[in-house]
Amino acid sequence: MFENSFEVGGLMISPVHMRVERLPEVIAAHRHSNISYELHYTHSGMGSAEVGDTTIPLAQGSVYITGPNVVHAQYSDRAQPILEYCLYLNAQAAKPAPELEAFLRTAFWCGRDDGALLTLLEALLQECRTRRMGWRENCRALLTQIVVRLTRLYGGAAGERTERPVELQPFSMMPALEDAFFYHYRELTIGALADMLHLSVRQTQRVIMDRFGKTFSQKRTEARMSAAQQLLRGTRYSVTEIGERVGYSSLEQFTAAFHKWAGTTPGAYRRESGAKNVETEKKRAKKREDA
């Protein structure tokens, strides 16, 4: 969608893609490179996101940002699935302007939009779709406004934010590779992935090892197990149904794979997670009462 990098306030911005999509029930836990930032805007629907140890309820107008190497996963309500605007870009700089350091240093932010972000995102999407005369220039202007708007939000009182040390290391990004594992883990094969990337199977295997330090099989299992854990914690599907949803043809295969991965059975994991959730909710309720 985007073609050129550009500079704003000492930051070199390289937009990767923007998309609007109705989310599946589960997007497995994943993270991006050490220069990547992803904006998630809930246009409609309901669900939640898990960012590290934080669970964020999502509804219309919810916004959360994940910075470099931040592990995040997402649920979308089955009855009211989320329609999400997602903007993914890379950013790095040797000497960013002081007022934009907050953008570069933000590992995670969540809050709500006052309407300004949605207007900018919708205008950006329209420019990218129509590609009328001057669309590249308008895209740069809109992206600049989005970066500035986010930085202002980070500096405000509302929302929740965590920082990270700035790491300015070059990294080759392959969004299609990452997308394949957290969208298509159920049925993904090495041959299909090679076709997606326009590489040979051998080249694809090498890229996966270089990027993730894992074989294709190990990475696919990681994606499947991450999704299974989310479904066990956050849904009432039976263990058999969950096994089918993450790509296993029988309960026995799923149980054996899950036990090897997590060191416990799916049923035991669900019971333990339920007990932890009850305890966490008790602590939250007590904290609210004390406040």
Image (tube, rainbow, N blue to C red):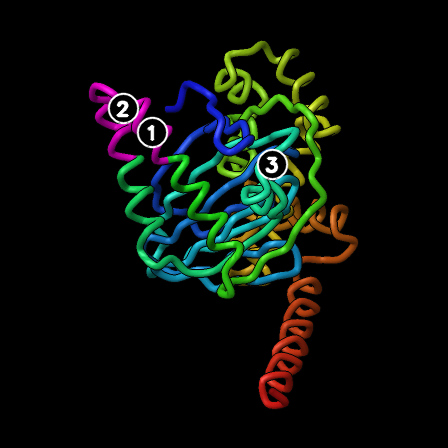
Residue type, numbered disc 3:
His
Queried whether the magenta region covers residue 84, the answer comes back as: no
- Picture coordinates of residue 210 (x, y %)? 71, 22
What residue sits 31% from the left and 35% below the top? Answer: 124
Queried whether the magenta region covers residue 135, the answer comes back as: yes
The answer to whether 225 appears left or right of 214 in the picture is left
The answer to whether 242 appears left or right of 218 in the picture is left
What residue sits 55% from the left and 11% below the top? Answer: 199
Helix or strand or loop: what does disc 3 sit on? loop
- The reply to whether residue 83 is in sight is yes
* Circles 2 and 3: CB atoms closer than 8 Å: no
Residue type, numbered disc 1:
Cys
Q: Can you tell which of label 3 and label 1 is closer to the viewer?
A: 1
- Which is more toward the observer, 146 or 99? 99
The residue pinned by badge 1 equals: 139
Q: Can you say which quadrant of the picture contains the C terminus?
A: bottom right
The residue pinned by badge 3 equals: 32
- Which is more toward the observer, 121 or 223? 121
- Bin the neighbour count of mark 2 within 10 Å (Cα to Cα): few under 14, some 14-19, many 20 and up: some
**Which residues lie in the magenta part?**
125-142
Helix or strand or loop: what does disc 2 sit on? helix
